[in-house]
Image (tube, helix red, strand yellow):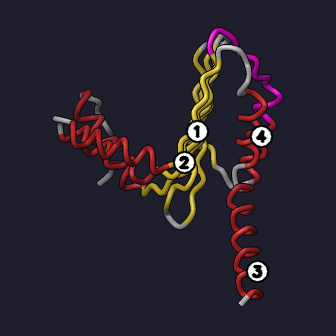
């Protein structure tokens, strides 16, 4: 009995280390910059997000808000780092982080450059599900990083786009 309990403990420990190692570059980056001045940092487990979304869905009046909040049940972990009034993050650190994420099968999804603003989105997909979402946005005087662990189908994203396009009269191209 002691041997089986010890084996189970070792397997659980190794499994937890493997799960934590999946986003080690993001964690290291977050830890490096979370103590900078004018920094807002948030790390939330998924159950808190799901609970808040459940309350929000009960209080929401319009069906679009309810549909979008329903997607929050797919979030497993949220991490946000926002630095205002300065941008201490070096281009070298960002390049190193994105290179490490690409090695861990993150795929670039979107890159926007507008003047001094740079925004990039990367996702990690497995078995038709988006498992990780990563956003970096930086300007001369601000920096934002958002990292999500989730289980999101492509159909869910299509539904959000449809809701937002209906709400804001954005024409969305469709394929037939």
Callout 3 crowding tier (Cα within 10 Å): few <14, some 14–19, many ≥20? few
84 vs 37, nearest the viewer: 37
Going by the picture, which residue comes out furthest to the front? 2
Which numbered disc, 1 or 4, marks the residue that appears first in the sequence?
Answer: 4
- Identify the residue shown where x is 76% and y is 74%: 10
Q: Position of residue 48 (x, y in %)?
A: 45, 45
Q: Which residue is mark 4?
A: 28
Callout 4 crowding tier (Cα within 10 Å): few <14, some 14–19, many ≥20? few
Q: Quadrant of residue 61?
A: top left
Q: Is residue 62 visible?
A: yes
User: Magenta region: which residues?
Assistant: 84-95
State how far apart marks 1 and 2 are (Cα). Answer: 8 Å
Q: Please tell me the numbered disc located at residue 6.
A: 3
Q: Looking at the image, do the residues carrying marks 3 and 2 touch, with CB atoms under 8 Å apart?
A: no
State how far apart marks 4 and 3 are (Cα). Answer: 30 Å
- Identify the residue shown where x is 74% and y is 61%: 17
Q: Nearer the viewer, mark 4 or mark 3?
A: 3
Q: Is residue 39 magenta?
A: no
Q: Which quadrant is home to the N terminus?
A: bottom right
Q: Looking at the image, do the residues carrying marks 1 and 2 touch, with CB atoms under 8 Å apart?
A: yes
User: What secondary structure is marked by label 2?
Assistant: strand
Q: Is residue 64 left or right of residue 156?
A: left
Q: Position of residue 19 (x, y in %)?
A: 68, 60
85 vs 164, nearest the viewer: 85
Q: Is residue 116 left or right of residue 158?
A: right
Which numbered disc, 1 or 3, marks the residue that appears first in the sequence?
Answer: 3
- Identify the residue shown where x is 77% and y is 87%: 3
Q: Quadrant of residue 116?
A: top right
């Amino acid at each position: 009995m002691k041997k089986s309990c010890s084996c189970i403990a070792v397997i659980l420990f190794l499994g937890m280390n493997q799960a934590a190692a999946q986003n080690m570059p993001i964690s290291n980056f977050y830890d490096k910059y979370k103590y900078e001045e004018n920094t807002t940092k948030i790390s939330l487990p998924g159950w808190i997000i799901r609970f808040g979304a459940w309350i929000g869905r009960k209080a929401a009046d319009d069906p679009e808000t309810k549909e979008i909040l329903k997607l929050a049940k797919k979030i497993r972990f949220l991490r946000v780092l926002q630095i205002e009034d300065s941008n201490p993050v070096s281009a070298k650190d960002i390049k190193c982080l994105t290179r490490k994420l690409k090695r861990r099968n993150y795929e670039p999804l979107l890159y926007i450059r507008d003047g001094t603003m740079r925004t990039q989105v990367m996702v990690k997909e497995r078995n038709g599900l988006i498992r990780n979402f990563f956003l970096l946005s930086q300007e001369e005087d601000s920096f934002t990083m958002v990292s999500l662990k989730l289980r999101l189908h492509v159909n869910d994203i299509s539904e959000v786009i449809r809701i937002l396009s209906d709400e804001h009269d954005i024409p969305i191209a469709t394929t037939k």
